[in-house]
Image (spheres, rainbow, N blue to C red):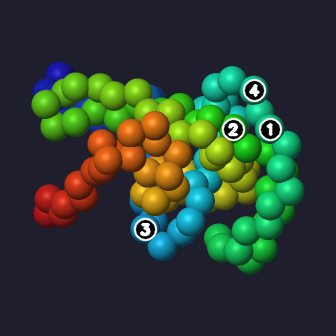
Amino acid sequence: MNNRTEEKEYWETESYPIAIDSCCSVSIAKQREDFVGNMQECDITIQGFSGKSKITTKGTWKFKIRDDMGTEYEILIPDMLIATEAPYHLLSPQHWEQQSKDPDGTYFIIKKTR
């Protein structure tokens, strides 16, 4: 098995797409099982992926990312909205920074590789 095949299998079984949108003001996840801790009731209406959507639950989203060197990082973002009808997870960089305990240390670089 070559490395490309192994990476593809890992991607297909352990990962999911996260859209990064610097224009949105909150982050949205679509799966309850991606949250940790107690969930909180809320009454928020958002405009976006399917017109207006009413959000009734929020919590702390937990996910892992791996850098180019293979180091894995666990990310926790409080006050993440749950929208099961969303087509994908949506990460707002400003929401992540606002929720961080170390906002000066919260950053990421996006670069096109192809």
Q: What element carries label 2?
A: strand
**1 and 4 marks in contact (CB < 8 Å):** yes
Q: Name the residue under label 3.
A: 22
**2 and 3 marks in contact (CB < 8 Å):** no
What's the residue type where badge 3 is placed?
Ser
Q: From the viewer's perspective, is residue 27 above or below residue 1?
A: below
**2 and 4 marks in contact (CB < 8 Å):** yes
Left or right: where does residue 88 sit relative to residue 18? Answer: right
Residue ID at (50%, 33%): 76
Position of residue 4 measured from the top left corner of the image (x, y, whole percent): 18, 35
Position of residue 93 measured from the top left corner of the image (x, y, whole percent): 43, 57
Position of residue 83 measured from the top left corner of the image (x, y, whole percent): 72, 52
CA separation, marks 1 and 3? 25 Å
**2 and 1 marks in contact (CB < 8 Å):** yes
Q: Mark 2 points at which residue?
A: 59
First in residue order: circle 1 vs circle 3: 3
CA separation, marks 4 and 3? 27 Å
Q: In which quarter of the image is the C terminus?
A: bottom left
CA separation, marks 1 and 4? 7 Å
Q: Is mark 3 on a helix, strand or loop?
A: loop
What's the residue type where badge 2 is placed?
Gly
Q: Quadrant of the N terminus?
A: top left
CA separation, marks 2 and 3? 21 Å
Q: Mark 1 points at which residue?
A: 40
Number of marks in picture: 4
- Residue 46 visible somewhere in the drawing: yes
CA separation, marks 2 and 1? 6 Å
Residue ID at (16%, 37%): 68
What's the residue type where badge 1 is placed?
Gln
